[in-house]
Image: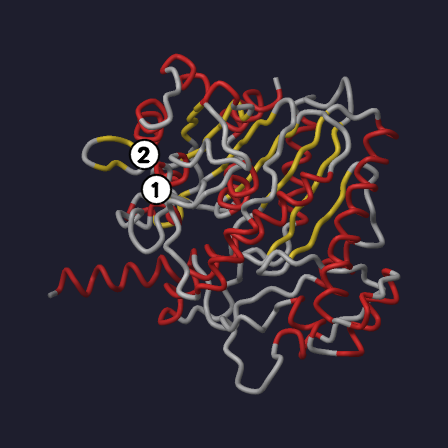
């Protein structure tokens, strides 16, 4: 009994620290406004809600209270709250402002107006990115994706960009940076009772956001290499943009939602000439993700794969992804700590599924999957556990250089 109580207490600490709690959804308009006056000539910032809907230009007003609380006594995990589609299609004045700004008519049908606006927003992003590529003579897209419990990733992204510049990876030609800000939920008041359920919602959000990112990537006009760098749950977004991750997700309870998801995954997966994926502390399972590695739209054979290499920055002592020894439970985060199952580390299990199930050559796999063990600042010394935040990984100078070298050289 004492051991059980101890486990519950420790688990509560972990959940408070690494997951999110009630009143947990993110309102990105204030971050969008803050970043607007300081545009950077090689950076485009994309803001997304929990369902992967795009925040419009700041000239289009959003009433925060109505957006976050569309009706009295709304639960923050409710599908209608912090949902841009619901906000605009159920409120005539905001929809009118949105339509007028983007010059969309839509025959007065809210759903059609909103979808036409979404397509225009994505097209505008694509045009801006193309203009940057031309102006800078850029030869690479670099996408940053943060994880959960991040209200404003601007500083983290600045640190990542500084590391790239510090390593002189962009000296010869310029890169265009695409920063993704998404509702991975936030830890507001540490209510343990809702933490497990909130983590489930954060994971689900990453499905929709990954497909929204795929939509943006599909519209990019210049056939230059793509590098995606993720942290934490951002790995679920990055992989979901590149291939159809289905095995790690349970079937949705609502049949209509499942049909919508299935339709979204029919969207063409990226076909850039060179795609590189780097994940720091990926808060997701390894085997259940990469068993779907060839599931593209359309599906591919191993010989047609263009994602190479996949660099995995892991830390067995990261308190958030290891969850002490519960990494495989409550929404697996086994890849980020290289969790050992039946004496086999997760990354070795990933290699095995690529060889056995997907028929990749073992010599190729040894170069495709590049694991790098990181060490971060101690968080709970008595338990030998370390920090999870991106800045701590960037401070491991030896291993972050290896990580960047494998992505950019």
Q: Mark 2: which secondary structure?
A: helix
Quadrant in which residue 141 is drawn: top right
**What's the residue at 78%, 74% (across, down)?**
94
Q: How is the image coloured?
A: secondary structure
- Left or right side of 83 for 240: left
Tag of residue 195: none
Quadrant in which residue 335 is drawn: top left
Q: Nearer the viewer, residue 343 or 398?
A: 343
Give residue 137's position: percent from left, percent from top: 83, 24
Which of the marked residues, 2 or 1, is nearer the chain's N terminus?
Answer: 1
**What's the residue at 68%, 73% (across, down)?**
87
Residue identifier under label 1: 334
**What's the residue at 35%, 48% (across, down)?**
332
- Left or right side of 125 for 393: left
Residue identifier under label 2: 346
Q: Decide: marks 2, 1 in contact (CB < 8 A)?
A: yes
Give residue 139's position: percent from left, percent from top: 75, 23
Q: Nearer the viewer, residue 275 or 319?
A: 275
């Amino acid at each position: 009994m004492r051991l059980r109580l101890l486990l519950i207490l420790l688990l509560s600490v972990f959940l408070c620290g690494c997951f999110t709690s009630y009143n947990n959804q993110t309102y990105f308009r204030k971050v969008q406004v803050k970043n607007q006056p300081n545009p950077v000539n090689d950076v485009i910032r994309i803001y997304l809600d929990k369902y992967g809907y795009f925040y419009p230009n700041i000239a289009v007003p959003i009433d925060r209270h109505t957006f976050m609380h569309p009706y009295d006594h709304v639960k923050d995990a409710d599908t209608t709250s912090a949902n841009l589609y619901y906000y605009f299609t159920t409120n005539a004045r905001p929809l009118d402002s949105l339509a007028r700004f983007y010059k969309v008519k839509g025959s007065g049908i809210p759903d059609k107006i909103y979808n036409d606006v979404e397509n225009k927003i994505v097209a505008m992003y694509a045009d801006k990115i193309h203009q940057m590529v031309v102006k800078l003579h850029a030869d690479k897209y670099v996408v940053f994706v943060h994880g959960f419990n991040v209200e404003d990733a601007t500083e983290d992204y600045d640190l990542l960009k500084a590391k790239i510049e510090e390593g002189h990876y962009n000296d010869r030609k310029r890169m265009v940076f695409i920063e993704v800000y998404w509702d991975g939920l936030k830890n507001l008041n540490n209510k343990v009772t809702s933490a497990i359920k909130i983590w489930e919602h954060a994971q689900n959000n990453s499905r929709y956001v990954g497909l929204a990112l795929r939509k943006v990537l599909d519209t990019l006009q210049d056939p230059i290499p793509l590098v995606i760098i993720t942290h934490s749950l951002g790995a679920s977004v990055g992989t979901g943009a590149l291939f159809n991750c289905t095995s790690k997700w349970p079937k949705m309870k609502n049949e209509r939602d499942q049909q919508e998801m299935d339709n979204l995954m029919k969207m063409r997966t990226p076909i850039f000439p060179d795609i590189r994926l780097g994940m720091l502390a990926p808060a997701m399972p390894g085997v259940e993700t990469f068993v779907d590695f060839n599931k593209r739209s359309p599906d591919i054979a191993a010989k047609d794969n263009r994602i190479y290499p996949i660099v995995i920055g892991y830390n067995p002592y990261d308190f958030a992804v290891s969850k002490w020894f519960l990494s495989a439970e409550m929404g697996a985060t086994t890849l980020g700590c290289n969790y050992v199952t039946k004496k086999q580390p997760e990354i070795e299990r990933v290699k095995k599924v690529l060889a056995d199930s997907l028929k990749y050559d073992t010599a190729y796999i040894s170069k495709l999957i590049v694991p790098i063990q990181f060490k971060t600042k101690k968080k709970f010394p008595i338990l030998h556990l370390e920090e999870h935040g991106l800045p701590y990984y960037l401070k491991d100078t030896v291993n972050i250089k290896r990580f960047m070298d494998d992505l950019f050289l």
